[in-house]
Image (spheres, helix red, strand yellow):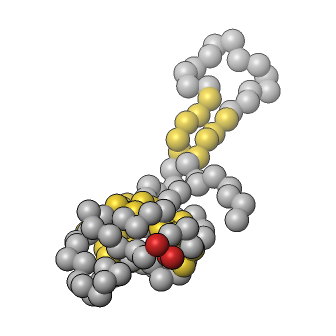
C-alpha cells in the first residue's frame, strides 16, 4: 500500500525526485514508519514500512510550515481520515445446511487479517 500526494505547484527540487527520504510532507497519526519518494516535482508516494493496524483510525495531514523549493510557503491543506476494518469473519463454507453431509464435515472460515508482506 502507498499513499500518493499530488500538488498543483512545484514542491520538490529536481535533485529530490526519485530519492527516498524519511522527511515526508505527509504526516500520519498515529505514526507509521516508512519512506517518502518524490516521483516528480509535484507528486510523490509514502510507502509504509509495515502493515496498517486493524481497527485503527488514521489522520492524514501535511507537515506544518511546508515550503516549496524556493522557500515560499506551500499554502496547501490536507485532512483525511482513514479507518481500517476490525478483525472479522469474511466468509465461511458451507454457506447453507446440507442434509447429505459426510460423517466428517469440513468447515472453512476466512478472516480478514491483512495479507503477509515481506519487507
Indicate the position of residue 9 as horizontal and vertical percent values: 27, 67
Give the quadrant of the C terminus: bottom right
Looking at the image, which is closer to me, 116 or 36?
Answer: 36
Q: Residue furthest right?
A: 104
Residue positioned 52% across, 41% down in the render: 90
Indicate the position of residue 71 as horizontal and vertical percent values: 29, 87
Residue positioned 58% across, 34% down in the render: 92
Residue positioned 24% across, 85% down in the render: 72
- Tell me, yes or no, if residue 40 can be seen here: yes
Residue 24, placed above or below residue 118: below
**Number of residue marks:** 0
Along the horizontal axis of the image, is 77 left or right of 6? left
Indicate the position of residue 83 as horizontal and vertical percent values: 37, 60
Q: Residue furthest top?
A: 100
Quadrant of the rendered structure where residue 80 is? bottom left
Quadrant of the rendered structure where residue 91 is? top right
Looking at the image, which is closer to me, 97 or 24?
Answer: 24
Amino acid at each position: 500500500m502507498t499513499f500518493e500526494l499530488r500538488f498543483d505547484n512545484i514542491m520538490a527540487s529536481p535533485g529530490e525526485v526519485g530519492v527516498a527520504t524519511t522527511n515526508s510532507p505527509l504526516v500520519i497519526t498515529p505514526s507509521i514508519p516508512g519512506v517518502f519518494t518524490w516521483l516528480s516535482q509535484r507528486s510523490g508516494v509514502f510507502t509504509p514500512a509495515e502493515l496498517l493496524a486493524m481497527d485503527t483510525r488514521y489522520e492524514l495531514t501535511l507537515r506544518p510550515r511546508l515550503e516549496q523549493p524556493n522557500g515560499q510557503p506551500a499554502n496547501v491543506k490536507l485532512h483525511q481520515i482513514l479507518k481500517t476494518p476490525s478483525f472479522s469473519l469474511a466468509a465461511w463454507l458451507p454457506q447453507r445446511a446440507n442434509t447429505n453431509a459426510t460423517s466428517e464435515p469440513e468447515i472453512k472460515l476466512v478472516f480478514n487479517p491483512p495479507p503477509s508482506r515481506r519487507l
